[in-house]
Amino acid sequence: QVPLVESGGGSVAAGGSLRLSCASFRYIYSYSRYCMGWFRLAPGKKREGVALIDGDGSTTYADSVKGRFIISKDDAKNTLYLQMNDLSPEDTAMYYCAAGRPGLGLQNFAGYNAWGQGTQVTVSS
């Protein structure tokens, strides 16, 4: 059973916004204990860490999304969010949420031991 389930992807024109959600079922019962991150993978590109929110509430963003994306979570709902604003075609990718121990950072992909199946975001010019 997939422990994390993403939703909210879709197709949008450049300059538009989307909000992704990542819900946890059974595997992670309290988001507050984990480092939760959003990652993306586009055809022909390397996997990229987009944003994370750590167990202490601190956030980290990739330079490519700073000022446009906002990561947040609702511990009561066990749900992670990614508000994406001012989208560009370069943001087109499959977006995944992941969870792992605190302090992992955006590059330590192997350290995240729970992944969702992804939600597709397509931005047209």
Image (spheres, rainbow, N blue to C red):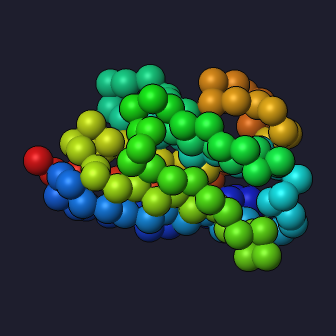
Please give the name of the residue rendered at 28% of the width and 52% of the height, measured from the top-left corner.
86
Residue lying farthest bottom? Answer: 77
The total of numbered circles placed on residues is 0
Residue lying farthest front? Answer: 67
**77 is higher (above) or lower (below) than 34:** below
Is residue 92 shown left or right of residue 103?
left
Please give the name of the residue rendered at 45% of the width and 29% of the height, measured from the top-left corner.
63
Is residue 52 shown left or right of residue 68?
right
Residue 114 visible in the snapshot: no
Residue 113, picture quadrant = top right
Residue 112, picture quadrant = top right
Please give the name of the residue rendered at 82% of the width and 48% of the height, measured from the top-left corner.
55
Residue lying farthest left? Answer: 125
- Residue 33 position, x and y percent, is 88, 53
- Residue 106 position, x and y percent, is 63, 30
User: Which one is nearer the viewer's eye here, 18 or 24?
Assistant: 18
- Residue 51 position, x and y percent, is 57, 41
**57 is higher (above) or lower (below) than 105:** below
**22 is higher (above) or lower (below) than 38:** below
User: Which one is nearer the viewer's eye here, 88 or 108?
Assistant: 88
Residue 28, picture quadrant = bottom right
- Residue 102 position, x and y percent, is 84, 39
Residue 52 visible in the snapshot: yes
User: Which one is nearer the viewer's eye here, 63 or 19?
Assistant: 63
Is residue 122 shown left or right of residue 2?
left
Assign the N terminus to one quadrant of the image: bottom right
